[in-house]
């Protein structure tokens, strides 16, 4: 427990941070407990948040936090009036101006370090009196490390042999989520998994990124999975939904209105057959990964929607969680991808994001890693990079050329295959030459 008390405003800010930023609660879990707060209501809500975190492994949204308090009330822990008071306090807290993500944590850790150093000084005086001069430096250094070193104790190789052997014996390979493009899924041994969750679609303008994302989203639902689309580009929710309808029903987008009843019947039959689900959310340009994570958590808590595959369209329109740390945009762009990959691993899904090639690479038949626009370091963050290219002749013939440019878990540097495309007919469809794969689950 923290060895000092926060002022009332800081207590409300801490409460706000726990529901606004899912990354905060795990960080303060080790350093702060409910008794560290003076306000009894804040104590109650922090205790509820910690209980929720311990139970689910995730931080509660405002709705989930109040539900946790309600459940405690139903169990007789608190009087009914507390629920209303907690709702009012939460509303007041969430209307406060935002802090930087780790401000509350850093305040706690700084105070703990200062307290520890003063305690070490006091102990050192006794050590000097006892003539144990060699122990003085060790005491001060140990205190100084509090709040600066990692919470993780690290791993001893020999003593942990039994533990890791047992873990390997229980190991079950995670499910892989492919694209439905059989040739590509064959090359990548089934596609992305939670161990290797981030795929990049590398292409120039009008080269087929939208078609590929459409294909991935539709295929995920077609094999019974759940796909979540975050659209940060010019495409809104309606446009995404229309494109998915076109993909599912093999109907040109400009014919969806004229064939509304037919499209509805086909989509109903498709959903009933596949059991899959798709959710599309338009996010404002400049959103952070923290915003995406909070929305995904809200979907899980309120609707029970847990995505297997997420498409982020696209990261170049986002900002980093702590954007002020980066002076140059290319550094921030790579940080955004690192945060997206961490987000996917945290919630146990895989995902894709499009990225542009440089203007100089548009004339190349096959782009290279240094042709990635914005930040070369993206190449080292992604687990799989699939490039899409179209010459003028290929575009006229409704063909898209693809290749695996880089992969952590399968062969890479495999330059090309060609896929038929129905984009020119307004259907936004990418088709594999061979039959679609069976549901692997």
Image (cartoon, rainbow, N blue to C red):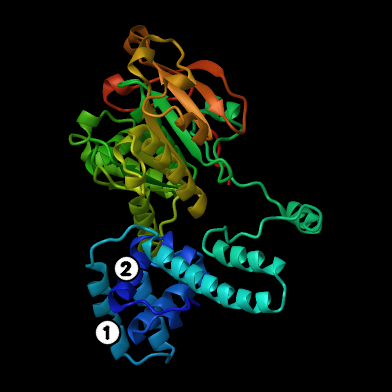
How would you rate the neighbour count of disc 1 (Cα within 10 Å): few for under 14, some for 14-19, many for 20 or more? Answer: few
Instruction: Return the residue nearer the eye: 385 or 105.
Output: 105
At which x and y percent is residue 197?
Answer: 52, 42
Left or right of 427? Residue 174 is: right
Tell me the SS state at disc 1. helix
Can you tell which quarter of the image residue 229 is in? Answer: top left
Q: Determine whether 245 is above or below 417 in the image.
A: below
Instruction: Return the residue nearer the eye: 237 or 327.
Output: 327
Residue bearing mark 2:
16
Residue 404 visible somewhere in the drawing: yes
Residue bearing mark 1:
85
Q: Determine whether 211 is above or below 262 in the image.
A: above
Q: Determine whether 233 is above or below 52 in the image.
A: above
On residue 141, which mark appears? none
At which x and y percent is residue 132?
Answer: 72, 72
Q: Determine whether 415 is above or below 406 in the image.
A: above
Residue drawn at (44%, 51%), measured in percent from left and top? Answer: 307
At which x and y percent is residue 370?
Answer: 46, 20
């Amino acid at each position: 427990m923290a060895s000092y008390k926060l002022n009332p405003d800081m207590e409300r800010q801490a409460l706000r941070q726990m529901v606004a930023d899912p990354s905060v609660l795990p960080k303060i879990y080790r350093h702060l407990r409910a008794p560290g707060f003076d306000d009894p209501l804040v104590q109650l809500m922090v205790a509820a948040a910690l209980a929720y975190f311990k139970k689910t492994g995730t931080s509660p949204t405002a709705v989930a936090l109040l539900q946790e308090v309600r459940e405690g009330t139903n169990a007789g822990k608190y009087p009914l009036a507390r629920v209303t008071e907690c709702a009012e306090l939460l509303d007041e807290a969430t209307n406060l101006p935002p802090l930087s993500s780790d401000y509350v944590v850093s305040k706690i850790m700084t105070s703990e370090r200062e307290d520890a150093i003063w305690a070490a000084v006091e102990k050192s005086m006794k050590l000097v009196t006892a003539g144990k001069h060699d122990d003085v430096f060790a005491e001060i250094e140990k205190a100084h490390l509090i709040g600066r070193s990692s919470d993780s104790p690290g791993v001893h190789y020999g003593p942990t042999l039994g533990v890791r052997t047992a873990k390997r014996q229980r190991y079950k390979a995670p499910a892989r989520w492919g694209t439905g493009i059989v040739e590509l899924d064959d090359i990548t041994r089934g596609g992305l998994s939670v161990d290797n969750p981030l795929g990049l679609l590398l292409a120039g303008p009008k080269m087929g990124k939208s078609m590929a994302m459409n294909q991935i989203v539709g295929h995920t639902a077609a094999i019974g999975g759940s796909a979540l689309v975050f659209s940060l580009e010019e495409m809104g929710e309606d446009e995404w939904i229309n494109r998915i309808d076109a993909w599912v029903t093999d109907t040109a987008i400009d014919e969806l209105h004229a064939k509304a009843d037919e499209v509805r019947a086909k989509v109903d039959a498709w959903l009933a057959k596949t059991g899959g689900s798709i959710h599309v959310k338009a996010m404002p340009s400049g959103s952070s990964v923290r915003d995406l994570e909070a929305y995904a958590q809200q979907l899980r808590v309120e609707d029970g929607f847990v995505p297997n595959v997420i498409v982020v369209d696209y990261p170049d329109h986002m900002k980093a969680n702590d954007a002020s740390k980066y002076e140059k945009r290319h550094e921030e762009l790579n940080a955004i991808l690192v945060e997206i990959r961490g987000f996917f691993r945290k919630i146990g899904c895989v995902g894709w994001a499009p990225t542009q090639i440089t203007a100089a690479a548009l004339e190349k038949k096959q782009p290279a890693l240094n042709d990635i626009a914005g930040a070369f370091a993206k190449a080292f963050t992604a687990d799989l990079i699939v490039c899409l290219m179209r010459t003028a002749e290929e575009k006229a013939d409704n063909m898209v050329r693809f290749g695996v440019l880089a992969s952590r878990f399968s062969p890479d540097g495999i330059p090309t295959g060609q896929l038929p495309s129905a984009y020119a007919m307004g259907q936004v469809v990418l088709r594999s030459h061979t039959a679609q794969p069976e549901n692997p689950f």
